[in-house]
Image (cartoon, grey):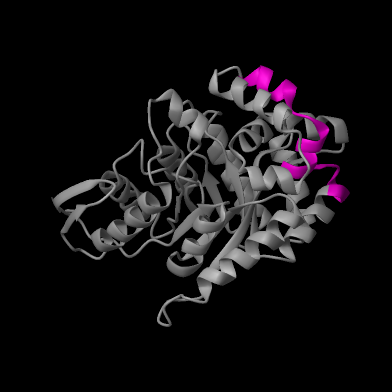
Amino acid sequence: MLGVELAPEEPLDALAALGERAERAGFDAALTSCHYNNRDPLLAAQRVAAATDDLLVGPAAANPYDTHPVKLAGQVATLAEASGGRAVLGLAPGDRSTLANLGVDRDRPLRRVLESMTVARDLWAGERVDHDGTFVAREAGLNFSVDPVPVYVGAQGPDMLRMAGKHADGALVNASHPADAAWAADRLAEGVADRPADRDPLDWVLYAVTSVAEDRGAARDAARFPVAFVAAGADEAVLDRHGLDREAVADVAAAVEAGEFRTAADRVTAAMLDAFCVAGTPGEVADGLAALRAHGDGVVAGWPLGPDREAAIGHLADALDLRPGRGQ
């Protein structure tokens, strides 16, 4: 998969236009990010689907805490129907800091994601479901049929990566640096070693915060907001891998949890930008994405894409050597 992330912080008409631009540029997919304080990601994905012909669409990544997993399965099935079978489901535990704003405790996140994926597949297969685990479902079923939707697990930690390698159709690996990509590849391989023989090969994709512009400084400044969220939720082992100052990261995380996003962005250091995004001139971003693609099956260029998003999609298509109309 070669795709772009579209964040519904912009009006849906603007996102649909960016999705159309991405399809014309040759991308395979446009995935909509999921945060309670933005517009609805599934509605956004439907609008992108309506504006395109072949582009894969879906949330990346929905979490099974702020929406009941059975309802989420029905919503994604609806998107699959509306898009003519072009839906994918990105599924992840969600961002700790923003879920905390809702009073949500991410209890047993790996188990929650695995159970949600399993139940969704059963529902899409037309089965009625009784489930009592990290969530409860009693005689639940969908009143309409849908072909199975590919599930891509969003993963960064070792256990979630192994689980994705064993059970998921694909993995969206939160990594913007080759060192993280190489480490993740080893963890995924450990899961793939236990993968059932009758399952299709795992499709694993680097999900990299990306910002590109002719002006290097403008590109890096545009990446500060998403990098603040990545840094705030990063595992301690990841921080150690990049030699990041724990106190500086804690300051960013505190601002994110307080909803002071401008302050959080201002506290992002150059070292955090180097570790958690691919940002800079078109040439720099081309080199960064090539280094990531050496490890995985594909890449999703994550929001913000750049200070001028339409121009950024063109730069990214060139960086990835896409053919215009490739996805059509």
Q: Is residue 165 above or below residue 207?
A: below
Residues rendered magenta in the picture: 261-284
Front-lying residue, 170 or 253:
253
User: Looking at the picture, how far across and down is residue 89, in whole percent?
Assistant: 43, 53
Front-lying residue, 122 or 312:
122
- In the displayed structure, does residue 237 sit left or right of residue 45? right
User: Looking at the picture, how far across and down is residue 49, in whole percent?
Assistant: 46, 48
- In the displayed structure, does residue 33 sit left or right of residue 219? left
Q: Is residue 111 above or below residue 71?
A: below
User: Looking at the picture, how far across and down is residue 321, in whole percent?
Assistant: 77, 61
**Residue 127 appearing in the image:** yes
Q: Quadrant of residue 320?
A: bottom right
Q: Residue furthest left?
A: 139
Q: Residue at x 54, y 53 (%)?
A: 155
- In the displayed structure, does residue 149 sit left or right of residue 257? left
Q: Is residue 160 above or below residue 269?
A: below
Q: Does the magenta portion include 94?
A: no
Front-lying residue, 173 or 145:
173
Q: Residue furthest bottom?
A: 197
Q: Residue at x 48, y 46 (%)?
A: 61
What secondary structure characterizes most of the magenta part? Answer: helix
User: Looking at the picture, how far across and down is residue 203, in whole percent?
Assistant: 55, 67
Front-lying residue, 274 or 6:
274
Q: Quadrant of residue 231?
A: top right
Q: Does the magenta portion include 262?
A: yes
**Residue 278 appearing in the image:** no
Q: Residue at x 86, y 42 (%)?
A: 281
